Amino acid sequence: MDPDASEAAARAALSVLSIAATPNETLSSFSFLDASGGAKSLRSTQLRGGYKPFGNGLYVEGLVAYQKYNPVLFFPEIAPNTELDITWSSVAATVGIGWEFPLVNEWKVRPIGHLSIGQVTADAILGDFPLLRSEPGSNELIDGDLNAFGVGASLGIFREAQFGPWQGEYRVRQTFLEFNPINEPEAGNASASSNQTTLFSRHRYPLENVKLFELPTQLVLDAGVVLYHGDSATVLDTDWLATAGVGFEIDTSLTSLPAVQAGRLMLNGVVAEGFSGFSIGFGLRF
């Protein structure tokens, strides 16, 4: 087996996993995304949340994600002059602990350290796919998986403000995670990084004459863009992914739900270089 080819396959798998494991603030706390274009498709389910458990600056966040990515890729190290039709299935969990510091004019900054663990499984049709080896000379469906861990950090700056009846929310976040295989000798020195910049805004407007379940309701508009750098951009074949959406938020502060202030339902359009699709999301505000 060609060691360079095995390392290339592992590096690609780690790059795909890193996208699933990185918190995407342009999506709702609980979201389903479906985007496709040309010979590739991206589907993901993400459950993400964060809170301050002690009422001071300590901030804790977590992410669980499942993702399927199906591109047609070209690996010169694996199969020169051959396109590989492959489906990557990733499952990942990421936790973060940080501290929130006040700045000026209602802005706050939040540095966070992250730990992540995940698994990516590859299904491919190629007779001699390194790392995920099939029987010699065969050309049957083959599969395999790669376990990995990631370490990194993020720095977020955000603001919440009131403009007449409108409530605005603005966030900028830079996240970097480095992923390495767990007990995979054939992966060699493979590693991959997720380096993402997220810009996001959300606006709420009270609908005085509209009530859902007899509860006060707000119109919600949001928009955001994720800028991918390095390995993430290479494997997705795009430097950016943008979303814009509309939804409703129901005030639940007067109900018996403990600590929950509002529930939100969003429908977002998703577009990127070579991608288009939608996401459906649900969020809770505490």
Image: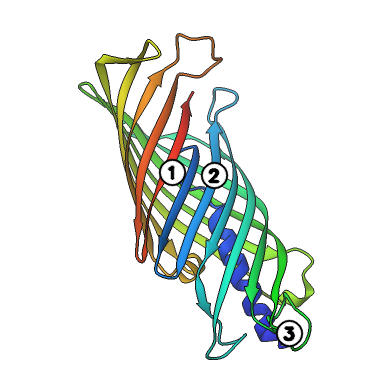
Nearer-the-camera pick, 102 or 159? 159
Image coordinates for residue 278, horizontal then vertical, percent: 39, 48
Q: Quadrant of residue 190?
A: bottom right
Q: Residue at x 34, y 32 (%)?
A: 247
Q: Are marks 1 and 2 in contact (CB under 8 Å)?
A: yes
| Mark 3–mark 1 distance (CA, rounded to whole Å) | 42 Å
Q: Residue at x 60, y 87 (%)?
A: 79
Q: Residue at x 59, y 50 (%)?
A: 66
Nearer-the-camera pick, 267 or 92? 267
* Above or below, comparing residue 44 to residue 4 in the picture: above
Helix, strand or loop at label 3? It is loop
Image coordinates for residue 122, horizontal then vertical, percent: 65, 67
105 horizontally vs 46: left or right: left
Q: Three-letter amino acid code at disc 3?
A: Ser
- Name the residue that disc number 2 marks: 46
- Name the residue that disc number 3 marks: 138
Neighbour tally class for label 1: few under 14, some 14-19, many 20 plus, Cα within 10 Å:
many
Helix, strand or loop at label 1? It is loop
Q: Earlier in the sequence, mark 2 or mark 3?
A: 2
- Name the residue that disc number 1 marks: 27
Q: Three-letter amino acid code at disc 1?
A: Leu
